[in-house]
Amino acid sequence: MRTSLATFALLLGLSLSAQQKSISPLPVLPAEARSAKEGATRAVVIGISDYQDLQIPDLRFADKDAQAFANFLYSPAGGSLDGDHLQVLTNTQATAGRIAEALDALIEKAQKDDQVIIYFSGHGDVERKTVSQPGFLLAWDAPSRVYMGGGTYSLAFLQEVVTTLSTQNLAKVTVITDACHAGKLAGSQIGGSQLTAASLAKQFSNEVKILSCQPGG
């Protein structure tokens, strides 16, 4: 139930574009490329294509991409993770509450030198009415407006989780996001996708981020 960072460097060449096309098949690394394993691997994989709020445009492949990535992690090439080390939340399972519980469990369980992976494919946006214009990942139960009312996971708190994992738990954290933005969402007038990407791109010492944020739905 371990995998090396070399595995995730390989993912940089993949297309994780939920709103345009499905994920490509994942290649298998040779055994020598998966050496030098340290710690356990723990992952939370989230993909949302079908949103509860009818005002939030559905996506075509976000849930499928998430499941494909989870299947990779289940496989020997991805570390043969089991249910104790990998939690997969798609569509109706991916409520804000369950996402929060899954990420909290990472803090509870991750130890020094563990590899921690957080994968999100779905909508991302900002709340445009406030001065700070905070960014959010939209869970299945998100509203199309007033994101601070619930149904979302704030990027500020996500960064708190990631920083805690990397500086307190001393884990090696990889964050992979494919958070697109549709014109009908609350942040459409101020470039919600780009602002979401900027918030996600903040880099800390023990973290790797692979981002794909696009403005089109």
Image: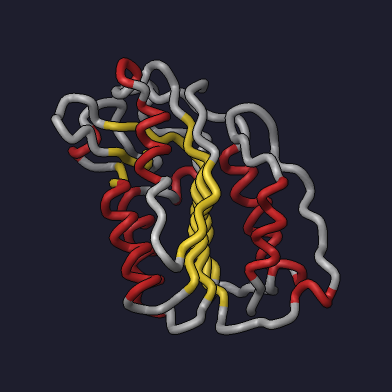
Q: Position of residue 8 (x, y in %)?
A: 65, 60
Q: Is residue 21 visible?
A: yes
The quadrant the N terminus occupies is bottom right
- Residue at 79% from the left image edge and 48% from the top image edge: 25
- Residue at 33% from the left image edge and 55% from the top image edge: 158
Q: Nearer the viewer, residue 186 or 7?
A: 7
Against 190, residue 174 (above or below) is below
Q: How is the image coloured?
A: secondary structure
- Residue at 60% from the left image edge and 30% from the top image edge: 60
Left or right: 146 as drawn, with respect to 1: left
**Residue sitting farthest toward the right:** 30
**Residue sitting farthest toward the left:** 131
Against 192, residue 121 (above or below) is below
Left or right: 84 as drawn, with respect to 169: right
- Residue at 41% from the left image edge and 29% from the top image edge: 193
How many labels, in total? 0
Instruction: Determine the image quadrant of residue 72.
Output: bottom right
Q: Nearer the viewer, residue 54 or 7?
A: 7
Left or right: 160 as drawn, with respect to 171: left
Q: Position of residue 157 (x, y in %)?
A: 27, 54
Instruction: Determine the image quadrant of residue 24.
Output: top right
Against 145, residue 13 (above or below) is below
Q: Is residue 90 visible?
A: no
Left or right: 105 as drawn, with respect to 21: left
Q: Position of residue 46 (x, y in %)?
A: 50, 51
Instruction: Determine the image quadrant of residue 164.
Output: bottom left
Q: Position of residue 59 (x, y in %)?
A: 54, 29
